[in-house]
Image (cartoon, helix red, strand yellow):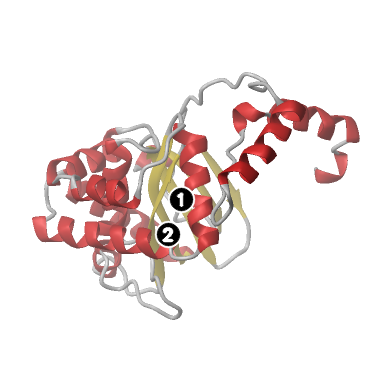
Amino acid sequence: MVGRVSSAQLHSFVADNFTTGRMALVGLGVKHSVLRQLGEGLLSERSGAGAPVAQAVYRGGELRVQNTDDLVHALITSEGGVTGSAEANAFTVLQRILGAGPHIKRGSNIASKLSQGIAKATTQPFDATAFNASYTDSGLFGIYTIAQADSAGEVIQAAVAQVSGVAEGNVSEEDVIRAKNQVKAEYLMSIESDESLMEEIGAQVLSTAAYQLPDAILQAIDGVTHDEVVKAASKFVDGKKTMASCGQLLNTPFVDEL
């Protein structure tokens, strides 16, 4: 596929997308006058809003790739929250409640709701994490599982059941507070270096046309309520699903069976 991209297509892509309306110029430790001079040069070369982009529409669907692998990989998602919104913050907290994976090398995810719930359904090895991605016009939230082919159904069903439990209110205030603290700690660690801070500023400006200071981000996370987390889980449970899976899929449920 990559080998089929022509020079003309590349030039067209750059002309449509590398414009000032789609750029963010961020600098740390540099004089404003120097940065402004650089920006004025870009304005003269790449001015414009770029080609119009249609807003994303979430549709749902399913893709199954049958092969001979012993492990089944499956991702089940529903529509999530728009980046920067209170709903997106609630989904981020929900992700940590369910389990977002270990944060250190050789760490364990065994204490997460997903791992604890699935461990009651199978004695086979597995891995499960919550998936969350927010964009400017939509988002995705779901569960990613890895399981032995003969136990894939039990693992997937048990994982979905954990989200259903949260949607029914089976999550404590302590769980929510702990998850919010994890989100805040991860955010602060993600902007410790100049490079990561610049990336964070640029991403915010490009997606929301504004920049929120870390204190404002932390305040927004602290503002997520128990009811908002339950509502986010309900949106996943009740929403139209998308599912992608690969492996020996004989015991893997179809999306309409979840």
Percent x, y for residue 241? 40, 37
Q: Amino acid at mark 2?
A: Thr
Percent x, y for residue 146? 46, 63
Q: Quadrant of the N terminus?
A: top right
Apparent side of residue 50 relative to residue 229 in the rendered image (left or right): right
Q: Residue at x 68, y 32 (%)?
A: 40
Q: Amino acid at mark 1?
A: Leu
Answer whether labels 1 and 2 touch (C-beta < 8 Å). Answer: yes
Q: Quadrant of the C terminus?
A: top left
Q: Label 2's element?
A: strand
Does residue 116 appear in the picture of this structure?
yes
Residue 166 in the image: above or below residue 114: above
Q: Residue at x 73, y 28 (%)?
A: 46
* Label 1 sits on residue: 75
Percent x, y for residue 95? 31, 53
Percent x, y for residue 237? 27, 39
- Considering every residue shown, the one lying at the far right of the view is 7
Q: Nearer the viewer, residue 169 or 45?
A: 45
* Label 2 sits on residue: 145
Looking at the rendered structure, the number of numbered marks drawn on it comes to 2
Does residue 18 appear in the picture of this structure?
no
Q: Nearer the viewer, residue 152 or 209?
A: 209
Residue 146 in the image: above or below residue 210: below
